[in-house]
């Protein structure tokens, strides 16, 4: 029987190319986590095609939510609230999840909680780290975002640094395309880099004048493209594994040095990673080593909770819900929603 202290959230995520639903108990226990990936179809086009993403979400959302409920073994009576990603993301993709969640909230008479996608990524760290509590520093590295976020309390976020141009994941995807690895580039570079020498080519580590915690990856991306073009013009073979390993080292160096510096600046001795690029094995190894050297505790996260999923939305939604936050049926998709902002 459900006691008053048990809060069960059904969560829905459709901001990009995964249709996902999950049931999460008390913000930390994942009862189910269903992810229908669209990667195969988008791979044909070399990246996410927004119209196809929306259409696929429409096709799959019913079954995905049904499966999440069945896997969790709970009935709607046991659901306390419905959480849904309402931004940022692709507007047509977000709308499918938001409209579905609103219809369900109305039909089942449940409270509705709109969740920020990146706040979801950050909250994913609570799932496997039972003792993780704010304050902590979080390095958010996804396909669309690269941020250093001080999590001062549940639901209280302060942006310490951000990318000025490409997101880390975007740089991985673009470099992967340039060396012919295809989409999505991150996991493919991760794998190939294991066979390469990360010190083979000295790619730049950009600094942003006057903003020590900000990132810039477009110069690095151009440097890799120039290197490849230079080799091709001279009819020189280049070692793909060395190129991606050296690129990956430049990205991880930039990320890790700033994450550690930001944690120190804020007097925080806990560091977590979030977003798809947080699944990168070289990044994880570099963070682990730097945390050891600097007496900072590193909270690990499994790859399934790094990339897009709905369990993370259920966790963030739980903390919003117990703090009294809920939305009415006027909730709309906000493609450029800012971290820490509620609309
Ligand atoms: O968080 P996510 O699933 O979606 C967004 O919200 O953007 O992140 C997707 C990004 C892609 O750019 C993908 O290439 C990257 O995460 N990624 C990785 C790895 N796995 C996924 N990048 C580097 N190494 C990986 N192992
Ligand atoms: Zn994401």
Image: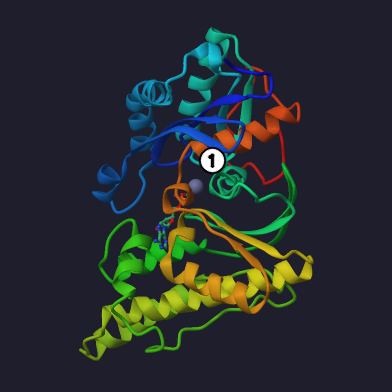
User: Is residue 84 something one can see in this rendering?
Assistant: yes
Query: Quadrant of the rendered structure where residue 171 is?
Result: bottom left
> Where residue 218 sits: x, y (%)?
50, 71
Q: Nearer the viewer, residue 183 or 84?
A: 84
Q: Position of residue 249 (x, y in %)?
A: 46, 78
Vertical side of 128 occupied by 79: above or below: above
Compared across the picture, whether 254 is left or right of 183 comes to right
* Residue at 72% from the left image edge and 41% from the top image edge: 341
Above or below, 19 relative to 180: above
Q: Considering the numbered disc 1 on the image, is that residue within a helix, a strand or a loop?
A: helix
Q: Name the residue: 55% across, 16% down.
A: 78
- Answer left or right for 270 relative to 64: right
Depth check, front residue: 339 or 129: 129
* Residue at 57% across, 70% down: 255
Q: Which residue is mark 1?
A: 312
Point out the image quarter for the N terminus.
top right
Relative to 105, does residue 34 appear above or below in the rendering? below
Mark 1: give few (<14), some (14-19) or many (20+) Cα within 10 Å: many
Q: Position of residue 75 (x, y in %)?
A: 47, 14
List x then y, in percent, for residue 215.
61, 69
Residue 53 sits in which quadrant?
A: top left
Q: Residue at x 25, y 84 (%)?
A: 232
Tell me the quarter of the picture where residue 170 sits: bottom left
């Amino acid at each position: 029987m459900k006691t008053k202290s048990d809060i069960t959230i059904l969560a829905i995520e459709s901001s990009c190319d995964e249709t996902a639903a999950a049931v999460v108990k008390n913000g930390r226990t994942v009862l189910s986590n269903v992810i229908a990936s669209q990667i195969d179809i988008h791979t044909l086009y070399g990246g996410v095609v927004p119209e196809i993403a929306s259409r696929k979400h429409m096709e799959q959302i019913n079954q995905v939510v049904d499966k999440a409920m069945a896997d969790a073994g709970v009935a709607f009576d046991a659901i306390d609230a419905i959480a849904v990603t309402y931004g940022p993301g692709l507007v047509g993709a977000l709308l499918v999840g938001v409209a579905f969640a609103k219809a369900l909230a109305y039909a089942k008479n449940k409270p509705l909680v709109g969740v920020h996608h990146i706040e979801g990524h950050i909250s994913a760290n609570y799932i496997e780290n039972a003792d993780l509590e704010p304050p902590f520093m979080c390095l958010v590295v996804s396909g669309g975002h690269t941020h250093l976020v001080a999590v001062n309390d549940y639901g209280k976020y302060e942006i310490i640094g951000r990318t000025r141009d490409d997101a880390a994941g975007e740089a991985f995807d673009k470099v992967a395309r340039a060396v012919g690895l295809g989409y999505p580039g991150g996991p493919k570079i991760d794998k190939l880099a294991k066979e390469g020498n990360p010190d083979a080519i000295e790619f730049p580590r950009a600094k942003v004048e006057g903003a020590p915690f900000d990132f810039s990856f477009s110069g690095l991306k151009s440097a890799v493209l120039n290197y490849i073009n230079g080799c091709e013009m001279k009819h020189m073979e280049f070692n793909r594994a060395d190129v991606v390993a050296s690129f990956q080292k430049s990205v991880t160096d930039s990320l890790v040095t700033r994450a550690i510096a930001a944690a120190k600046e804020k007097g925080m001795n806990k560091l977590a990673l979030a977003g798809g690029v947080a699944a990168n094995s070289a990044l994880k190894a570099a963070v682990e080593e730097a945390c050891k050297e600097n007496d900072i505790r590193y909270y690990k996260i499994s790859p399934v909770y790094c990339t897009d999923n709905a369990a993370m939305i259920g966790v963030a939604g739980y903390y919003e819900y117990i703090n009294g936050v809920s939305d009415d049926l006027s909730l709309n998709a906000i493609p450029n929603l800012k971290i820490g902002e509620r609309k």
